[in-house]
């Protein structure tokens, strides 16, 4: 998928564990793991809001678009 | 619990049907081989004849009614054509049609058995079940077309080889639209089923 999640990077910068984030935002670790591993198909705005609020970041910090086709050509 | 029992019973019936169908196919193959080595193995006079559709059969003998003679005929019907000492080659095509018919049935039973196995293991909405339903749909459509096509070609070959003076025979490709519609219905159900599984996955992976 061309959308890459940088949740682990943001968490590392904040020195916060996934368990801690899970407890703070009230989302199960299983669901956060799905998001972190890039297996998630979609994210609700409400979830995004909770995570951004807790990590004090922008949605753009959490996600990155990588053009796979352009990369493959290079 | 009640549903589980029904599933198990249906699965057992399907298993019996599966082995019967296998036996039938094996019989067709064995007879085919025996015919290949010994042409006189089957006496065509004992066969049920070839299925034909006729548009008109004119009877040469008149019909007697109240002392008066009338000409009479049969029109638009189906029947089985019996010919003594006909070339045995026609039998191979009939056997091929029977083989294809049985093989497609076998495929349908195979996929049904797989579905019932999953259902008895409490696996209902899995992509494999959707794929099996889709394959069953395609098999049903094939079932209505392929054996009929072989019948049509065989009849055409037979009719080109035989001349009738007072019988007009029709050689039509009869498409069984009801079966095709049934196949299409199952196909649509399979697509909806697969889409449902996809949506459930989406729902599951939405954070």
Image: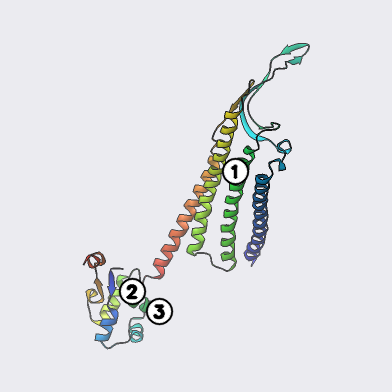
Q: Quadrant of the C terminus of chain A?
A: bottom left
**What chain does mark 2 sit on?**
A
State the quadrant of the N terminus of chain A. bottom left
The label number, if any, that marks residue A30 in the structure image: 3
Q: Which mark is residue B28?
A: none
Which of the two discs, 3 and 2, labels the residue nearer the N terminus?
3
Label 3 residue SS: helix
- The image shows residue B192 at horizontal and vertical percentages of 45, 56
Mark 1 crowd level (few <14, some 14–19, many ≥20, 10 Å Cα): some
Q: Nearer the viewer, residue A48 or B199?
A: B199
* Residue at x-position 41% and y-position 70%: B204
Labels 1 and 3 within one chain: no
Disc 1 designates what residue?
B97
Q: Is residue B159 above or below residue B112?
A: above
Q: Position of residue B152 (x, y in %)?
A: 56, 36
For mark 2, what is the residue?
A: A38
Q: Residues within 10 Å of mark 3 (few under 14, many from 20)?
A: few
């Amino acid at each position: 998928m061309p959308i890459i999640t940088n949740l682990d990077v943001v968490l590392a910068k904040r020195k916060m564990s996934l368990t801690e984030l899970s407890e703070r935002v009230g989302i199960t670790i299983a669901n956060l793991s799905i998001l972190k591993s890039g297996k998630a198909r979609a994210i609700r705005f409400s979830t995004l809001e909770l995570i951004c609020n807790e990590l004090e970041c922008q949605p753009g910090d959490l996600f990155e678009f990588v053009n796979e086709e352009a990369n493959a050509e290079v | 619990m009640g549903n589980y029992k029904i599933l198990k019973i249906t699965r057992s019936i399907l298993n019996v049907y599966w082995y019967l169908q296998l036996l039938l196919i094996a019989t067709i193959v064995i007879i085919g081989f025996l015919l290949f080595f010994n042409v006189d193995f089957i006496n065509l006079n004992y066969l049920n004849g070839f299925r034909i559709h006729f548009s008109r059969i004119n009877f040469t003998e008149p019909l007697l009614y109240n002392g008066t003679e009338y000409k009479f005929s049969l029109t638009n019907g189906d029947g089985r054509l019996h010919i003594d000492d006909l070339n045995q080659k026609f039998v191979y095509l009939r056997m091929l049609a029977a083989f294809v018919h049985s093989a497609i049935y076998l495929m349908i039973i195979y996929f049904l058995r797989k579905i019932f196995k999953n259902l008895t293991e409490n696996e209902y909405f899995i992509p494999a079940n959707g794929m099996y339903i889709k394959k069953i749909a395609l098999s049903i459509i094939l079932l209505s077309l392929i054996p009929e096509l072989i019948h049509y070609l065989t009849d055409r070959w037979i009719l080109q080889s035989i001349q009738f003076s007072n019988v007009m025979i029709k050689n039509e490709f009869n498409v069984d639209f009801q079966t095709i519609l049934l196949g299409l219905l199952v196909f649509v159900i399979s697509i909806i089923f697969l889409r449902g599984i996809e949506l459930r996955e989406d729902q599951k992976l939405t954070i």
